[in-house]
Amino acid sequence: MRTKYIVILGSVMSGLGKGVVTSSILKLLDFYDYRALPIKFDGYLNYDCGTMNPYRHGEVFVLDDKGEVDMDFGLYERFLNRNMTSAQSITGGKLFGSVIEKERQGGYLGVDVQIIPHLTGRAVEMIETVGKENKLDVVVVEVGGTVGDLENSYFIEAVRQLALKEPTVFVNLTYTPTMEVVGEQKTKPAQLGFKNLLQSGIMPNFVVCRSREHLLDKTREKLALFANLTRDHVIDDSDQESTYMLPLHFMEQEFDKKLLEQLGLPGKRNREKLDSWKKRVHNILNPKYSVEIGILGKYTGLSDSYASIKEALVHAGAELGAMAKMRWIESESLEGENADMSKLDGIDGLIVPGGFGKRGIEGMINGIRYARETHMPYLGICLGMQLMTVEYARNVCGLKDANSSEFNPLTEHKVISLMEEQRGVRKKGGTMRLGLWECRLAKGTTAYSLYKKENIGERHRHRYEFNNRYRDLLQKNGLVISGTTPDNKLVEFVEWKDSFGIATQSHPELRSRLEAPAPLFVGLVRAALERKSSGK
């Protein structure tokens, strides 16, 4: 069957949730068993997201194939329960770089290389390649940024050209604010967005309208008029209790049927897939229990920095019929003379997530010590494993100045040190230990009981590792090394003996999905529920 294309473009403003809409459309296609995958375009000239600040861009999402990509890829994987690849991420840097490389190699001899047709043609080629190589029925393209931005204008021209040769449906995500002063939904911003889109040579087949409340009939009719659509092609995207509700909300409006009709595709829903999704969404909305998990990190001012951790807790809660509430704790508040350890009062479990740089490190170590001494369930991720090791070395093994060489290169006891292969590395982009790596778990450990198998794989993103020179000392003093690389050279998991305290050098949150929750997060939430029920 000939591959078809859906292109999602945002107008009016950024931050409307194109990633959630794109993921929901992918899920609708999945309910009909169509082979569909996304492509995400980002206009920045970075080659990838690897060197971006989490405060500005949200978390860096890492794929199995070592790709460092936009956080929307986390949404795609969580909704589709499938692994994405780096080829599905197109950035301005990648696009311009490939054209310049071809020019340097003589691929355009005798030709003036231009934005149109060479750059736009290369973009179309990259889009079509994903469809062909994966033998897809539908490719769903999310165009980052807002219509009218200079940064994505050439890519919007590329998808216009794509539609000239391939069956393509355009979906415009727009915004209808409710003005509190007048108490009504205003359509003028959306109208201006339509104008920008039409000036780009694109007429939308559907308008998805982001709003706080449900779209009013009169608002829908007005939007349809200005977008040259029938009113049933204007789709409500009002606030939902959970993002995982959106595919079901779209189905209530028969968006799935209208989309398939527009694509010229027959369709019969896979009832088993749909029922499974509905069941888990029901569990999210109707929890039987609740626990509060503290997230002790250094980027808590922007929760998108830890988007995958938030979602992994949602997945674990849905699996156990519980709501895992999150308490964001800035690690710097737990250090120094004014350390406020009362910020940990009342929580049922603690997570120390990944991060870089020495700011707030001592506060994290204080929080980990508190969790160990009070038998509070603890999960350490990447940096959280390194600091769990540092805390144990200091306060159990008596190595008072133990640290990571990342934070104190002069310390005598570098229990965490730079990986050997990282020495001499000068480039920052794409040079860490990245992607999926195998791990072997020791039987009889907490890790093995959670994964229920000996050989596992998780994604990584780091430069520093457990220093094997201290392995025997730490084990002698009771720290459990429960997982290593298959060759036993690198430590991947450590645990406390006397309570639920486990940490991994990997990022298990990156492979957590609603339909396949991460075992470590399920274990943490279960341990937190048990602690809360025991009254400790």
Image (tube, rainbow, N blue to C red):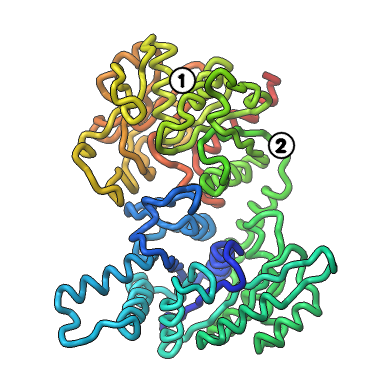
Q: Counting other residues with Cα less than 10 Å from the Cα at mark 2, is it few (<14), some (14-19), or many (20 or more)? A: few
Q: Secondary structure at mark 1?
A: loop
Position of residue 137 measured from the top left corner of the image (x, y, whole percent): 44, 76
Q: Is residue 214 left or right of residue 339?
A: right
Farthest residue in the right direction? 182
Farthest residue in the top direction? 398
Residue 384, image quadrant:
top left
- The amino acid type of the residue labelled 1 equals Trp
478 w.r.t. 154: above or below: above
Residue 251 visible in this rendered orientation of the protein: no
Residue shown at the point (26%, 70%) measured from the top left: 98
Q: Secondary structure at mark 2?
A: strand
Residue identifier under label 2: 289
Position of residue 331 measured from the top left corner of the image (x, y, whole percent): 53, 30
Q: Is residue 411 left or right of residue 346?
A: left
Q: Quadrant of the C terminus?
A: top right
Residue 458, image quadrant:
top left
| Mark 2 or mark 1: whose residue is earlier in sequence | 2
Q: Which mark is residue 496?
A: 1
Residue shown at the point (34%, 81%) measured from the top left: 115
* Residue sitting nearer the eye, 72 or 459: 72
Q: Quadrant of the N terminus?
A: bottom left
Residue shown at the point (84%, 65%) measured from the top left: 181
Position of residue 124 measured from the top left corner of the image (x, y, whole percent): 37, 79
Residue shown at the point (74%, 63%) measured from the top left: 212
* Residue sitting nearer the eye, 87 or 260: 87
Residue 82 visible in this rendered orientation of the protein: yes
Position of residue 292 measured from the top left corner of the image (x, y, whole percent): 66, 33
Residue 120, image quadrant:
bottom left
* Residue sitting nearer the eye, 135 or 106: 106
Marks 2 and 1: CB-CB under 8 Å? no
357 w.r.t. 217: above or below: above
